[in-house]
Amino acid sequence: MTPNDKLFDVIIVGAGHAGCEAANATAKMGFKTLLLTIDFNNIAFMPCNPSLGGPAKANLVREVDALGGLMGRVADLAHLQFRELNTHKGPAVRALRAQMDKRRYQEIMQHFLEKEKLISLRQGEVVSLKRTGEYWRVIMSTGVQYETTAVILATGTFLRGLVHIGLHSFPSGPLGQHPANALSEFFQAEGLCFRRFKTGTPARVRKRSLNFSAMIEQPGDHLPYGFSYWIPWQEREQVSCWLTYTNASTHQIIRDNLDRAALFSGAITGVGPRYCPSIESKLINFPQKERHQVFIEPEARYTDEMYVSGASTSLDEEIQDIFLRTIPGLENVEIVRPGYAIEYDVIPSNLLTPSLALKDWPGVFFAGQINGSSGYEEAAAQGIMAGINAGLYLKGEEPFILRRDEAYIGVLIDDLVTKDTLEPYRIMTSRAEFRLSLRQENANHRLTDYGYKYGLISEEEYELFQAEKNRIQQAFDFLNHHHLSPDTPQAEALFKEKGVTVKKKTAFRELLRRPEISYSDFADPETHGLKQREIEVIENAIKYQGYLEREKKMADKLRKMEMKRIPPDFDYNQVPNLSTEAKEKLTNLRPVTLGQASRISGVSPADISAILIWLSRR
Amino acid sequence: MIDNDTISAISTAQGAGGIGIVRVSGKDAFKIGEKILRHPSGKPIQTWPERRVRLGIVVQTGQRVLDEVVFFTFKGPKSYTGEDILEIQGHGGMENLQLILAATLEAGARLAEPGEFTKRAFLNGRLDLAQAEAVIDLINAQTELAHRVAVNQLSGGLSQILHEIEGKLFKILVPIEAALDYPEEDIPPLEKEEALNIIRSVKAQIRTLIDQAERGRILQETATVVLAGRPNVGKSSLLNTLLNEERAIVTPIPGTTRDFVTETIDLQGLPLRIVDTAGLREIDDPIEKEGVNRSWELIKKADLILFIIDSTLGLSVEDRDFIKEIYQSVHRRKLLFVLNKSDLPAKINPTEVNSIYPDEKILSISALTREGIEELKQTIRSELMGEDFSPEHPILVTRLRHKKALEKTKELLAQVEDGLKSGISEDLIAFDLRDAIDSMGEITGRSVNEDIINAIFSQFCVGK
């Protein structure tokens, strides 16, 4: 008999951004949760950029928040700076980006987790899992054993982590943490074949050694909102970032020393991301570019440590010193920690289902960077989904899978389990077929009902959401039922201010479709109790109505393909029309639906037609 | 192989011919051959060497000899359908071929469904979707020119152009997308003028394809040329003259109705259905009136109307009324005035007609002496296919589905153009561009859905 204190419903391995969200989800669903971390000091740690958000990523943060996750709230409480990007490129791609006080972020996240009575936080390294009856025995390096029904592996880059700095390499987790090798060896012994990915970071430097007068200041914006839908927004005292550029001499030094970069010396076998390349890769891939941006970002409010964004590198530590000093403002730079590249194990996409469960391992889920993604936001999104699905598994209910037209989370996970990802995956707006619908301001309208249904959204929060919905409904009623007639003072005012002529009696709603008109032209939103974000919800729904309807039509079409299920035992070899590549990939990935099959790279529409005909004739 | 059963059908067109083919495909094809084929001597056939033409006789189960035939076999997967195939060439004549077909069915084959041979070829990986569509066109192609176009499409000419267009559009789309996703990187802003130039050139390219599509349709489906005019102006003699000059195409479509005489000719590669309408006149007799009404239906649908005028009588009031009515009732008229009987003293000449109807083309001919017939033929051809048409300029778009997709693409590109000009936000420009690219994908097969596939296979006739 396992004693009660060693018995859990869910055990989550890893307390990074995926693990924290997963633990919050399972606890909110009422399950006794153990959150294990290899280092108690590093819960919700950000080993890379001290920032969250940006295009598509901000949408993920909002979506996680709308489902009842923690990332958005913590970010709002721990920010050093908020900016709004793409403000002139349309609402679909408008994006919040926030600099984080890394230390405060960790503290607040830990506080949120510690508040949850059903979460136990504990330090320790998992070395293996053992199936005993209906349970999993989770075995620690110290010999301690826990028993659980569900396991979520959110081990980030720790599995067989290998850090490279120049020609030196050593087993390590990110930023000098202890790697997890035993667990990786266990899974390999069980027949799981990992692939190796690579990522990297730049050096951290000392603030007092920098000359900011040679750089361009990047102050924050004063915004009427942060990420979270649930906590009152309060701007904190903002801290600036700084922009500077590399130059010809920087590039010369790097080029002369490429043989001392792990990435090009042959030391690294892992595949690196195109999305945040090292400075040496940038120079090799874009030799014509004369300079590259370098952002100096604070790591926290009360630290002298600064992050050199854009100069990620696997070069020798000595060379890092030299090339950084060629950059304006960094002439006397003191490095605090050198940049490094890290290689780690990643689970191939074909082993995971759309609910992030490991195929043929009942109750075992994977979330975060181990699944081949990169980025804190991507990790958090998978964490909350793996958490909800582990909870549903425990309840014996159908898994929760978001569609591509519902959320960036849906796009992210569908891509991760479908596409043969050969490099760390970063979410982008271009990956979303329905990006005009998947806006960041309306994530709660897309997802909060789910969050409430699964128990992640509290009654109080749901009431807030209902109130917002009511306000918006009232605003729509107002716009539908009020009209502007020609030759009225209001019409004249509109002409004066916006140059818009009203030719006949027109509903406010109709007028609002015009780009130059805004809600405030008809009424003071504040007297309607509307917040800025809510005005955006209303305006975007009206201004982009035609486009949104087109997206909806496309989504309906896609859903039809999504509803065509492929039997799990379907034998692709019996369909002779399939290309060899398609047969191989389909057999390997076993897509659940025809829609998923159509998105596998190397599977052509002709292949899909063949399967379709084949399925319909059975 | 996809099905266990073996299918059989008559593969040659209906109608009388020297020989006809019965084709059997499937795993039992050779077994069926063993049951129904014998050496001319009557001995059973033991071996089935591939791709060798052999002489034999077809026997019914009761050993009754049906026909002396030539037969050969293809072994799957190297055959049209990818399955074992037995082809039997018997003497033409539907009755005889029906008997051979019946013998194969009795021996264990199943009657093939429409399009089933090509469907099997597609499913067995012998044809891709675009090729399968081109096969439909090949089956339907009536003249050599139409055949050549189908072959051109089969070899991917259209896909190549669309790929090129896609590349051009990507030149605009990709930088927009990059800038949307990486707002803080120094990505050069969209060059509006350059983008507009690309859009305009692509639109022109697509317009050409669409224009060609109209010609493609004519090649594929046969253009209808209606001979209209009062009685006795020489409509039927013109029809006969054209028939004598050009090769008549034998079609299974009934030629003569009570009201019209229809003949299909091959005008230098251009398939034309020429309809001689009932003489157009105002009539009170309800039965004849019905015929006149139907003439008008035909005229409205025609690709080209030849309005015949008897030059010895001049333009009568009746003529003018008809022309007026054509102007009123025919929406997008293609009208050619033909002054017949140029061999006789004329009351009216082309210049005079032209002064009344300045927008129309007027030709003077004699159906009797064939004077002006050559010019008439050239004019018919250029009216239908355009001045610059030549078989060397391949037509790439022959299917309505392709044309519609291209029209949608063009429409979306016009939206992109407007958007660029009016400065709408880039997320919307990207949306329309993506949509435009996707709609081209409906041709290249990237967004093929179930409906399209069903339509393709319902269009196949039996056999190839």
Image (cartoon, coloured by chain):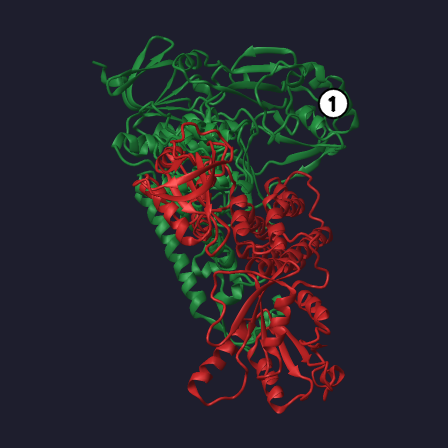
Chain colours: A green, B red
Q: Position of residue B13 (x, y in %)?
A: 48, 53
Name which residue type carries label 1: Arg
Q: Label 1 marks which chain's residue?
A: A
Residue A6 visible in the displayed image: yes
Left or right: where does residue B145 sit relative to residue A133? right
SS category of the residue bearing label 1: loop
Q: Position of residue B356 (x, y in %)?
A: 71, 86
Question: Quick one: which residue is furthest to the left in this view?
Answer: A1
Occupied quadrant, residue B64:
top left
Closest to the observer, A270 or A77: A270
Left or right: where does residue B373 sit relative to residue B281? right
Q: Position of residue B365 (x, y in %)?
A: 70, 76
Closest to the observer, A318 or A248: A248
Closest to the observer, B354 or A552: B354
Occupied quadrant, residue B319:
bottom right
Total numbered labels placed on residues in the image: 1
User: B341 above or below B190?
Assistant: below
Give the residue displayed 62% in from the left and 80% down from the top. B234
Give the residue displayed 45% in from the left and 70% down from the top. A482
Quadrant in the picture for the C terminus of chain A: top left
Residue B449 visible in the displayed image: no
Question: Quick one: which residue is furthest to the top in this view?
Answer: A143
In this figure, which residue is indicated by the disc labeled 1?
A: A325
Quadrant in the picture for the N terminus of chain A: top left
Q: Residues within 10 Å of mark 1 (few under 14, many from 20)?
A: some
Question: Quick one: which residue is furthest to the front in this view?
Answer: B41
User: A82 above or below B354?
Assistant: above
Q: Position of residue A463 (x, y in %)?
A: 33, 49
